[in-house]
Image: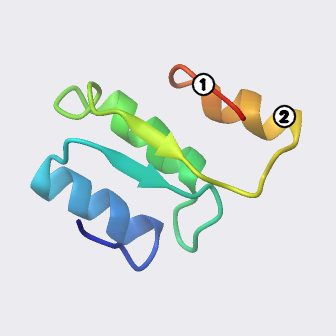
Amino acid sequence: MLVAADGADAHAIAVRLRPDLVVSDLVMPYRDGFDIVRALREDLTLAHVPIVILSMKDREEDIVRASRWGRTTTW
């Protein structure tokens, strides 16, 4: 397991190491979780990687925005 210091670091780690799973918050400095999800889905070598988003953001518009790039389940 690797932990990134911020969103920019998270993206760099994902590009370099090609993880089997990404767990992300939506609120991060430099690159937020929305941007990370979009970037991973647009990268053909990472588009298949499952992404789990854990966040305190629970407004409907945040959930819709995050889900534009993949399947979403909320609890």
Give the residue drawn at x 29%, y 27%: 47
* Residue that numbered label 1 is attached to: 72
- Residue 68 percent across, percent down from the top left: 61, 23
Q: Which quadrant of the rendered structure holds the N terminus?
A: bottom left
Give the camera-side residue of 21 and 45.
21
Describe residue 47's horizontal placement relative to residue 71 as left or right: left
- Residue 45 percent across, percent down from the top left: 16, 31
Give the camera-side residue of 74 and 18.
74
Give the residue drawn at x 28%, y 33%: 49
Q: Dot 1, how many residues are within 10 Å of its Cα: few (below 14), some (14-19), or many (20+)?
A: few
**Numbered tag placed on residue 17 in the rendering:** none
Label 1 is placed on what type of residue? Answer: Thr
Q: Dot 2, how many residues are within 10 Å of its Cα: few (below 14), some (14-19), or many (20+)?
A: few
Q: Secondary structure at mark 1?
A: loop
How many numbered discs sit on the rendered protein? Answer: 2
Describe residue 8's horizontal placement relative to residue 66 as left or right: left
Of all residues, the one furthest to the front in this rendering is 75
CA distance for labels 1 and 2 = 13 Å
* Residue that numbered label 2 is attached to: 61
Label 2 is placed on what type of residue? Answer: Glu
Instruction: Tell me which corner region of the image, top left, top right, bottom left or bottom right, holds residue 40.
Output: top left
Q: Secondary structure at mark 2?
A: helix
Describe residue 71's horizontal placement relative to residue 67 as left or right: left
- 31 lies above or below 49: below
Give the camera-side residue of 50 and 75.
75
